[in-house]
Amino acid sequence: MRSEVVKKGIPAAPNRSLLYALGYTKEELERPLIGYTKEELERPLIGVVCSYNEIVPGHMNLDKIAEAVKAGVRAAGGTPVEFPAIAVCDGIAMGHIGMKYSLVTRDLIADSTEAMAMAHQFDGLVMIPNCDKNVPGLLMAAARVNIPTIFVSGGPMLAGKLNDGRRTCLSHMFEAVGAYYAGKLDEAGVEEYENCACPTCGSCSGMYTANSMNCLTEAIGMGLRGNGTIPAVWSARLRLAKHAGMQIMELVEKDIKPRDIMTQAAFHNAETVDMALGCSTNTMLHLPAIAHECGIELDLDMSNEISSHTPNLCHLAPAGNTYMEDLEGAGGVYAVMKELTKKGLLDTSVMTVTGKTLEENLEGVVNRNPELIRPIENPYSPDGGIAVLKGNLAPEGCVVKRSAVASEMMVHSGPARVFDCEDDAIAAIYAGKIVAGDVVVIRYEGPKGGPGMREMLNPTSAIAGMGLDKDVALITDGRFSGATRGASIGHVCPEAAQGGTIALVEEGDIISIHIPNCSITLEVDEATLAARKAKWVCPEPRVKTGYLARYAKMVTSAARGAVLE
C-alpha cells in the first residue's frame, strides 16, 4: 500500500510518532492479527476530502456527510483521515469582484488536493464536494493523483414555496430583482422571494452548475446512484455517504483508479447525459478540464456531434418548473441513462466506482415519471440541451443552453449594444436602456480579460425579470450561471483580451444568431473588421497583482476548458 511509507518499519517510526500525536492508535494503523494473514496487517489510510464551510449553503451540511463517510470507512476496515478543500458560493459572489474568484478556485482546489494526497500518501480518497467549482476541481485532482477515489456530494436544496403555494428557486430570486427595476414587483415582493427561494441547505434546487456536475459525476462513473439527486436534508444522503465510505475499500482492494473509470467512452457518456438532462453551459468548461487531467482532449465540435443525435429529455429549472427532488423521485440520473440505452446512446461496458459496469448498474432501473423524464421516443427536442455556435464572431466557438431558450429567440438578428464590463451592462439594463431586439455584448470578461471569467447571472436575470428574455439576446466572452435562461451565449472564443472578433464589435453592428444551425455572425465585412483590428489596442490588465494576475498569465481559452499552462 502507498501508506506503508508513513506507517511501516523502523524508517517510518518518525512518521508514526506524528500520527500518534494526532491521536491515532496502533490498532488504527494496523489490522488485528486474528483472522488476517501477514500480508493483510496494515489498514488502508483513506483521505476524506471535505469542503465543509460556513459561507456556502451547499456546504454547511458536509461535516455530517464526512462523519457518515468515516463511519463507512471504519466499518469496512479502513482508517479515515479528513482534510479540507475550499469552496466559493457563486450566488453570494455574484455581481461584484468576488465572482472573479469563482472559476479560479477550481485550480486551487485541484492543486491543493493533489498536494495533500501526495504529501501524505493516502491509499484511497473519498471526495465530498457540492457546489459549482468544487466538484470539477476535485474531479481534476482525482484524475491527476490517480489513486482509488469515490465521490459523494452534499446533495441538492429543496425547492422553495411562495406564500401562494407556487414553488420557487434561486433563479426566480435573481429575476425578481429585474422585475423590481421594471416596476413589475414591489419591495415586499422581492422580500418574499428572499425568504422563500432557498429554504434548506444544499446546492441550489434547479439544474444549475453544481447539480449538473454532481449528476455528471454519476454519469461518468465516479459517484454512486443518487449522488446528484438525493436532497441534502434527506437521511438517504447520509446512508449514501456511508456506502461511499464502505465502497472506497473495495476500490482500494481491487486497485480501481479514476483513470480506469474516466475513459474516453466515459466522457462521451457524460456529454450524452449532459445533453439529455439540459445541464449548465459550465459543463462545457469543466468536462474538457477534467478530461485534460486524464490525458484526453475534448473539443467543442464533439459536443455538437453528440448533441445532434441526443434528445433532450428533461426541463428542470431554469428551463422548466421541476426541481432536483422531482428528478430523484422519477428515478434520478440512472433513469435518464436507462432511457438513453434504449437507442444505444451510451457505452455501458465502462467501469464505475461500484466495481461493476454501467450495464450492470442499470439492471432493473425504471423511469418512474415519464412526464418529468421524457421517454426517448417523446423528447422535448430531438437534439441536446446545449449547443455550440460558431461563426466570424466566435471562430473557436461559444455555447448556449438551448433547452432554456424561448422558441422566439432560436433565430434572432439585432443591433449590438456594447459594454466593456458586466457592471456597465447591468447599469444600462436597470436604467431601461435595453429594448426589444437588442443584442447585448459584454466583453473583456473572459478567463484572461476578466480575469476569471465572471458568470453573468445578474444581467441575464434582469433581462428575464423585465420580460425581455423573448426579445433580447446577450453575448459574452464571460460565462453564465446554470440558473440563466434565455438567448444567453457565453464562452465566446477567442476572447476580447486576446483580440478576438468580439473586441471589434461596435455599437449598432448587426449580429445574427441561428441556434438550430449552430451559427453566430457579426454582419460586418472582412475589410472593415481588418481595419478595426489594425487599430485595436488591448486594454491594460484590470488586476496586476496576486492570484488573479498569475491566473490571467497562465489560463488558456475557454474552448479548451480554461485549463492552466
Image: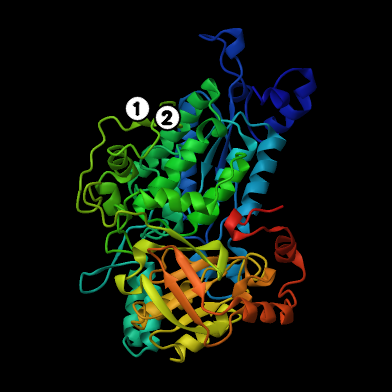
* Quadrant of res 365: top left
- Residue drawn at the location 51% of the way across and 23% of the way down: 77
Residue at 41% x, 88% y is 435
Tell me if label 1 and label 2 are in contact, CB under 8 Å: yes
Q: Is residue 251 left or right of residue 98?
A: left
Of 395 and 403, nearer the camera is: 395
Color scheme of the displayed model: rainbow
Question: Which label was assigned to residue 354?
Answer: 2
Side of 263 relative to 445 (left or right): left
Residue 193 picture location, percent across and down: 34, 75
Q: Nearer the viewer, residue 342 or 174?
A: 342
Looking at the picture, tell me which residue is in the foreground, 192 or 211: 211
Looking at the rendered structure, the secondary structure element under dot 1 is helix
Against 464, is 49 above or below?
A: above
Identify residue type, mark 1. Glu
Q: Residues within 10 Å of mark 2 (few under 14, many from 20)?
A: many
**Which residue matches tag 1?**
360
- How packed mark 1 is, by other alpha carbons closer than 10 Å (few <14, some 14-19, many 20 or more), is some
Which x, y percent locates residue 497?
A: 68, 71
- Element type where label 2 sits in the image: loop
